Image (cartoon, helix red, strand yellow):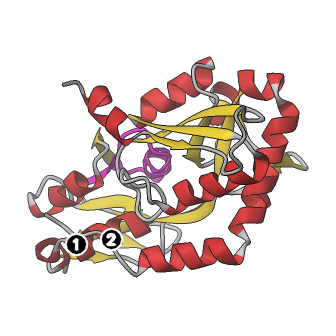
Amino acid sequence: MRASARYLLFIALLLPATGSATPAFTLRTCFENSDSYPWLLQSGEGVVQYHLKAVATALDAEIVLTPLPWKRCLSQVGSGQMDAAIKMSYSVERATTVGVYPMREGKPDPAKRLLTESYSLYQLKGGKSQWDGTTLRVNGVVAAQSGFSIVDLLQAAGAEVDDSSRDPLIILKKLVMDRAQATAIQTEVADSILAAYPALQARIERLSPVLVEKPYYLVFSHRFYQAHPRESRQVWDAIEQVRDSAAYQRYATALRRTPPVGE
């Protein structure tokens, strides 16, 4: 069975809870097809999945979430095959080739973000890699996830980057296999994996400060936004309202108390 077919088993249909026979509109979205704890989980129980279910309910809409390899997700949003990509950081290139961000005064509006997340640098305990918030020093390869924005940042800092995998567990294992001197992964994702795999946690450390911290958005395809500007703005407004709600905070807090368990 192809990977895409396997992941269809995890597709989450977030339907309006009002019982309406016809939703006000349907939004076809995609996201990275591996767990991004605590935000997006293949179980369908991630914080962002809860978030968008509440948005769908508030707008009497249907939001369809489809897990895809990240590069394919971006490609399908860019071509209009998908209506939106979930959990995208901003770059000028992405705003041109992929889709439309919520903007304010010529910049992405952080008030309309889905979440804020950081990337950190990891190495074997006692390693010689250094990061002081300005200068990166790594004597060897830095492993990072294929298609993720951190790759450009690392390359701009002069690092030799191995982005041959998109699986964060595999990337962390490259440290203990001596295939990379450091890894750059989203902080909560990497920390949750290390907590679930004590053997890795015993050998790997996170460097401070974080490499970068930035907001992530739901980004509409140019085609969908041009056809449905009002609905697009309604979704962004609802994202802000739900994110600031007490119910959202309770869900996110409860989920973080039950981190994933390793194999």
Eyeballing the image, is 67 above or below 159?
A: above
* Residue at (64, 25) in percent of width and height: 97
Query: Residue 122 versus residue 232: which sits nearer the camera?
Result: 232
Q: Quadrant of the C terminus?
A: bottom left
Query: Residue 21 versus residue 206: which sits nearer the camera?
Result: 21
Asked if residue 128 can be seen in this view, the reply is no
Q: Dot 1: few (<14), some (14–19), or many (≥20) neighbours within 10 Å?
A: some
Range drawn in magenta: 141-160
Query: Residue 255 versus residue 194: which sits nearer the camera?
Result: 255
Q: Quadrant of the N terminus?
A: top left
Tag shown at residue 196: 1
Indicate whether residue 170 is drawn in magenta.
Answer: no
Are the two marked residues, 2 and 1, in contact with CB atoms closer than 8 angstroms? Answer: yes
- Relative to 129, is 186 on the left or the right? right
- The amino acid beneath tag 2 is Ser
- The amino acid beneath tag 1 is Ala
Query: What residue sits right under mark 2 in the picture?
Result: 192
Residue 225 position in % (x across, y down): 78, 29
- Relative to 42, is 216 on the left or the right? right
* Residue at (44, 65) in percent of width and height: 38
Q: Quick one: SS at disc 1? A: helix
Q: Residue furthest right?
A: 105
Asked if residue 221 can be seen in this view, the reply is yes
Q: Dot 2: few (<14), some (14–19), or many (≥20) neighbours within 10 Å?
A: some
Eyeballing the image, is 210 above or below 162?
A: below
